[in-house]
Each structure stands twice: as structure tokens, then as C-alpha cells.
Image (spheres, rainbow, N blue to C red):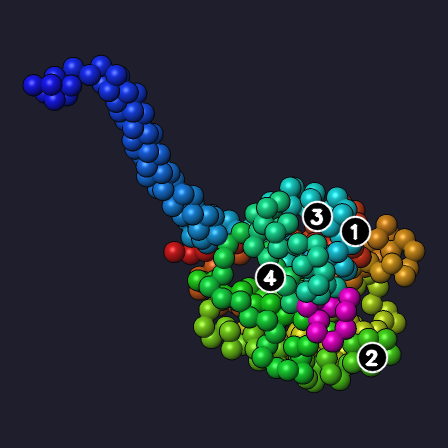
Amino acid sequence: MQEKSNTKEDPSKKESKEPQLKKEESKESEEKNIRSRSRSKSPEKKEEKDDTKEIYKFPFEENKQIKILFWNVCGLRALIPKKDLDKLIQEENPDILCFNETKLDEEIISKMNLKKLFKEKYNFISYFNNCKEKKGYSGTAILTKYKPLSVTYGMNKEKHDKEGRIITLDFDKFYLICCYVPNSGEGLKRLDYRVKEWDKDFFEYINNLKKEKDIILTGDLNVARENIDIFDPKGREKLAGFTKLEKESFNNFLKSGYCDNFRNFHKDEKKFTFFTKRAKGAREGNKGWRLDYFVTNNDLKNIEVKECDILDKDKYLASDHVPIKLSFICKK
């Protein structure tokens, strides 16, 4: 009897259990809420990841114009602190931006955190091909809002590929080639190499790509191909970029099935992309050369070029070259 009475009516034990139960219930409830919040967050994280993929997916919507800019920047490291790059991107809003003469190496790219900078500030994926033989020389880069299927550096010819002069992006419907063609140099020291070796192998490289897809070639191709492409042709036939051999080599390539898009849209316009800093007042006096190009194959199957032009020579002064642009749509 006494044992039964103690079990039933001991108030102290009853009171001590109630807070304990409430505490355990509260803990269990909190754990359920945490699990619930965790489950609800999971789809959001997955969705954000998918959105990132969509940003870099190439748009094939009908009549969606894609704009590519090219600029020989004469040193990307020096360009970044200046306002010209910000202004160019804000005003032109390019989908893809190609550079020549970046003059970078892996150490500088890492130290300046350039890939992160271009992605976070401008939403571009960036690809760099640097000169392997000499620091601060040559180099190419492409910034793109759309991720390519693959990237190729050089033309798979060791004798040409050490100077970081070519990047090729493989997109679904076309190849984009950014190229900085070697200058024949003072005294034309590299003229034979340029015409007989580089041009021969490079044009073969382009022709092989054209067998697979449309091509868009851009860059400082280091040749003013016609008299209209230089402010005054008289007496300049022995200067690098305007020799008979260089002009014949490039024009024969175009005749084999390619289009100089600026000249196609601007038949008789005398407009230039390069103004030497060695001659005072060259830019102000419009004493320039047209050395920078957008070239496509004549038999375009998957893209249609809508516009090609040279930007205002007095607007972007950070380089001795002027940016150029090409706009096109992809056919379905």
C-alpha cells in the first residue's frame, strides 16, 4: 500500500518531469524546423546553379543580335585602371570582347586576379594565351558571356605557337578566332617568316576550320590590304604592313572564299584602326592605317552578319588602335 501511494501521489517528482518534457519537446520542434529549412533551401541552391549555367549558354533565339568587339589594347595591365575599358563595355555592351597585345603572363593574371575581376565586374568568362618566350610581349585574350564548347590555343604548330598569338573558341554554329598576326618588323626582318611561313600555315588552319563550321576571324592582322586602307600610300610600299608580298598574301586568302566585313559594308569609306604615336598628331589628322579586321567565310551557313564598323577614333584613347565591332545573328 505504501509503495502504491508513493508512486501515485508524489508531487515533487511530477513537477520535476514537466519542465523536462517541455524542454525535450522544444528541442525536437527546433530540430524539425532546422530540417525543414534545410530541405527548403536545397532547391534554391540547385536553382541558382542552373541559372549560372543559363547565363553562359549561347542564345539562338531568332533575330537575337550578338555583338563582338575587338581591340588591340597595347597592354591590358595598363588599360584596366583607365576608364576606357569600362566606358567601352558600358556603351557598347558586347557579348564577346577580343584583345590583342595583352602583354601578360600567368603571374600577372594571378596577381591581378583578372579572371575573377572580369567575371564579377562584367560577367565575362576569360581566356588568355600568353607569350612563352618573352614577358610583356604579344598575347591574346577573349572575354565572353557564352561558354564555348572548347578552347584551342595556337594553331598546333610549335614554331608559331610560342608567342601566344591565337585563341580559337568553338561554339555550336561557328568558330571564333582571335589572332595577332606577326609584324614584319623594322627593316622587314620577319617578312619572309610572316608571308612564307606564318601566312601559309595560318590560312591552312582557317581553311580546315571552315570545313567544319562558319568562321569569324578577328584581330590585328598587320596589313593594310588596299590603298584606301592607309592615309597616304605613296612611298610606303616598303613599310611593314603595306608591302606587295603582305597585301598579295592576304588578298589571295580573301579571294579563296572570305569576306573583309568592314569593306563589305563600307565600300569607299576611308577609316582607320591604327594611329602611330611616333608621328605627332596622327590621330587628330586622321593619318592612320586599317590593320584590324573581322573576316568571315563567304558561304555562311549558320550566321548572318548584320553590321561591321570601326568605332569613334577619338573616343577610346588608351591604345594606338581603335576598337572595331561585328554584329550577327545565328540562323536556326
Element carrying mark 4: strand
Q: Are marks 3 and 4 in contact (CB under 8 Å)?
A: no
Q: Is residue 132 magenta?
A: yes
Q: Position of residue 213 (x, y in %)?
A: 46, 69
Front residue (pair 2, 177): 2
From which residue to which does the magenta span run?
A: 130-139
Q: Amino acid at mark 4?
A: Tyr
Element carrying mark 3: helix
Q: Amino acid at mark 3?
A: Leu
Camera-near label (2 vs 1) is 1
Q: Earlier in the sequence, mark 3 or mark 4?
A: 3
Q: What number is the disc on residue 85?
A: 3
Tell me the crowding category of disc 2: few under 14, some 14 to 19, or many 20 or more residues within 10 angstroms, Cα based: some
User: What is the C-alpha distance between the residues marked 3 and 1?
Assistant: 9 Å
Q: Residue at x 78, y 76 (%)?
A: 184
Q: Position of residue 105 (x, y in %)?
A: 71, 65
Element carrying mark 2: helix
Tell me the crowding category of disc 1: few under 14, some 14 to 19, or many 20 or more residues within 10 angstroms, Cα based: some
Q: Earlier in the sequence, mark 3 or mark 1?
A: 3
Q: Residue at x 67, y 79 (%)?
A: 160
Q: Earlier in the sequence, mark 2 or mark 1?
A: 2
Q: Amino acid at mark 2?
A: Leu
Q: Where is mark 2, residue-wise?
A: 188
Extreme-left residue of the structure: 1
Q: Where is mark 1, residue-wise?
A: 318
SS assignment for the magenta stretch, majority: loop
Q: Position of residue 199 (x, y in %)?
A: 66, 79
Front residue (pair 196, 138): 138
Q: Is residue 34 above or below residue 160?
A: above
